[in-house]
Amino acid sequence: MNSLLISKLATDDYVGFTFFVGCMAMMAASVFFFFSLNSFDKKWRTSILVSGLITFIAAVHYYYMRDYWAENGESPTFFRYVDWILTVPLMCVEFYLILKVAGATKKLMWTLIGASVVMLVTGYWGEAVPGSNSALWGGISGAAYFYIVYLIFFGEAKALAMEAGGHVLNAHNILCKFVLIGWAIYPLGYMAGTAGWYGAEGVLFGMNLDMDVIYNIGDAINKIGFGLVVYSLAANSSASSQAA
Ligand SMILES: *C/C=C(C)/C=C/C=C(C)/C=C/C1=C(C)CCCC1(C)C
């Protein structure tokens, strides 16, 4: 095989299509975040930089995943989880960074990161290791996911957001919804891609949805959307501090 040549993409290859478009969207978002860096107050620059790093890391992984899919016609599970194990903890860092104004501790940041690593490692086990009990590992992963939801909706992170108030509270609340609704897309992809759920593998609730299409849609919504919430927080807050 000549890997320098672009593989043919069949017109009904939705998976290949979403890998391709996902790659472009992640690249465009990264350029957007990086170039906007200097237009905001200094205190927001790290947050915007992290938004750009999240989409940039995803862009590079999508470049490889697109290729992997085109060459092998199978799910690039390994690259997928390497992408997530880098980008999801960065999203946890994002919560910490915006709550720092209210005194968020590194301990909170590491607790969120720890829970996200448990969520992803157990998910990988259930998805990638042959003969593993996908439902059991998915359940453990789901527990870690709900722990994250708890911390940001009701726990320490929420208390800090309330203390910060204003634009920060507003942004925190929107990010919480991304985690509750946007991140819930992933367990659906997992169920569609592993055996033993509400149908045969590849079929979920009677719909024939491919796991990778679901994951790719989730990534576009969550990685770019998350970054845009932080972007508008920086824009709103920089604007009101200039007016003051
Ligand atoms: C940019 C990538 C993101 C935001 C990825 C998030 C991934 C998840 C929230 C995955 C969650 C899972 C479960 C809650 C249970 C089944 C296994 C996973 C790993 C798909």
Image (cartoon, rainbow, N blue to C red):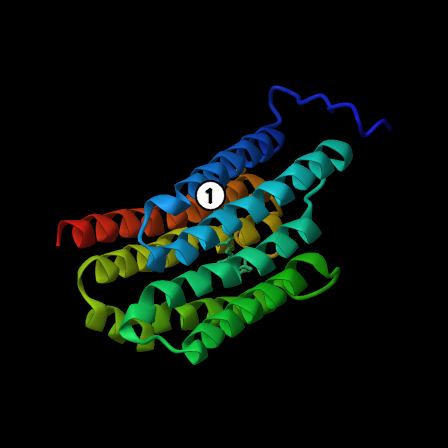
Answer few, some or many: residues within 10 Å of disc 1's Cα (few below 14, many 20 plus, some between 14 and 19). Answer: some
The residue that mark 1 highlights is 34
Based on the displayed image, in which of its 4 quarters is residue 100 positioned?
bottom left
In front: 37, or 202?
37
Q: Where is residue 230? Give x, y as percent.
A: 34, 52
Please count the marks in the image: 1
Q: Left or right? Give the position of 191 relative to 241.
A: right
| Residue name at image x 46 percent, y 48 percent | 223
Q: Where is residue 238? Give x, y as percent.
A: 25, 51
| Residue name at image x 44 percent, y 77 percent | 106
Q: Where is residue 75? Give x, y as percent.
A: 68, 44
Does residue 176 appear in this view? Answer: yes
Image quarter where the C terminus lies is bottom left
Examine the rendered structure and indicate whether residue 144 appears above or below residue 218: below
Image quarter where the N terminus lies is top right
Q: Where is residue 64? Give x, y as percent.
A: 69, 40
| Residue name at image x 49 percent, y 71 percent | 144
- The amino acid on which the numbered mark 1 sits, given as a three-letter code, is Phe
In front: 66, or 34?
34
Does residue 210 appear in this view? Answer: no
